[in-house]
Image (spheres, helix red, strand yellow):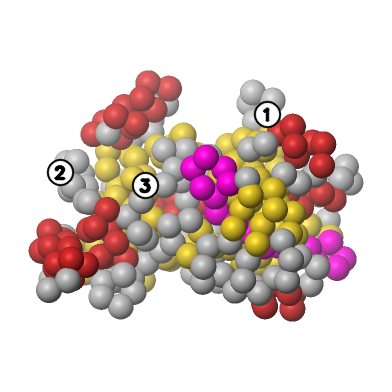
Amino acid sequence: MSTHTQAAAAARTRLSGLSFTKGHGTGNDFILVADRDGTVDLTAADVAAACDRHRGIGADGLIRAVPSSFLPEGRALLQQAPDAEWFMDYRNGDGSVSEMCGNGVRVFVHFLVSHGLIDLAEGATVAVGTRGGVKIVERSADGYSVDMGPWEFIYPDAAAARATDSLVEADGLQVARPGLSVSMGNPHTVVALAEIAELRATRLFDAPSVDPLPPNGTNVEFVVPHDPLMHDGVGQVSMRVHERGVGETLSCGTGACAAAVATRFWAGEDAPDVWSVTVPGGVVGVRFRLGAGGDEHVHLSGPAVLVASGTFA
């Protein structure tokens, strides 16, 4: 038996009997696990086995819902935000730990509501602990809206001077393209393409090459601004994404925010504050608003769907 097969078999044994729910936000899909007592200890191999699309449940990532008090990161956040009772412990599909997921946090809150772990009426908000900080999520008639917090350039001096800060190569693109690196609590590099045909021709099975590569790696978004860019005052872009530790996904919430940040920056002072981002899995909304401290926050809105529940055999 190969080492990989042995590791997968051991992971299946450890997962046996664990209850889960499968959900998605515009096709960005997740396995969700409730851990009320902080006793579920998942290794990277366990997460990778569960997320395997051929030998497991299949997902872009796994989210453990655990009280913030059971994690060092969560306890630190509780000192700032005592109402951030639940922590979104998010892992990429390969088992690596990630700071935050914009689609995932909407699905996470819907999971908490659906499983009776919190009460959240339409129009009400809940504070969620993540490794990217506390996120405030509001329930709406057709989904959830998340205050993703302030955005920032990863290389602010380079971005301000040149409007791009890196070169990106990807299979299907004839030459390297300039990119702009944006942090949404996790790293993103955004590349503008000229037309939808070019977006479709870009192959994202393998990770694009980014130079310079941000210290913790990066998600890469390829974006096509629509023509005209605005419709009824709303900016319009289409996007595909390669997520680090996952591969191409049907949607990426923080990636959609980063795409709107970069396109708005490139468009200049007259660019709108409200954006519609079309991804292969659907459409999400992005809105820019001033936060209480005077810095600019990004709000992400979109659906959250739970599709199945079960128990690992």
Query: Which mark sits nearer the N-terminus, 2 or 1?
Result: 2
Q: Residue at x 18, y 66 (%)?
A: 3
Magenta residues, start to end: 213-229
Q: Is residue 13 above or below residue 116?
A: below
Query: Which mark sits nearer the N-terminus, 3 or 1?
Result: 3
Q: Amino acid at mark 3?
A: Val
Label 3 to label 2: alpha-carbon separation: 18 Å
Decide: few, some or many residues near mark 3? Use Cα within 10 Å; few <14, some 14-19, many ≥20: some
Label 2 to label 1: alpha-carbon separation: 38 Å
Residue 244 location (% of width, % of height) = 48, 56
- Tag 3's secondary structure? loop
Residue 51's image quarter? bottom left
Q: Amino acid at mark 2?
A: Thr
The residue under label 1 is 295
From where the camera sits, is residue 156 visible? yes
Q: Residue at x 62, y 71 (%)?
A: 171
Where, quadrant-wise, is the C terminus in this rendering?
A: bottom left
Image disc number at residue 97: 3
The residue under label 2 is 39
118 on left or right of 133: left
Q: Residue at x 72, y 44 (%)?
A: 165
Residue 148 location (% of width, % of height) = 56, 42
Query: Which mark sits nearer the N-terminus, 3 or 2?
Result: 2
Q: Amino acid at mark 1?
A: Asp
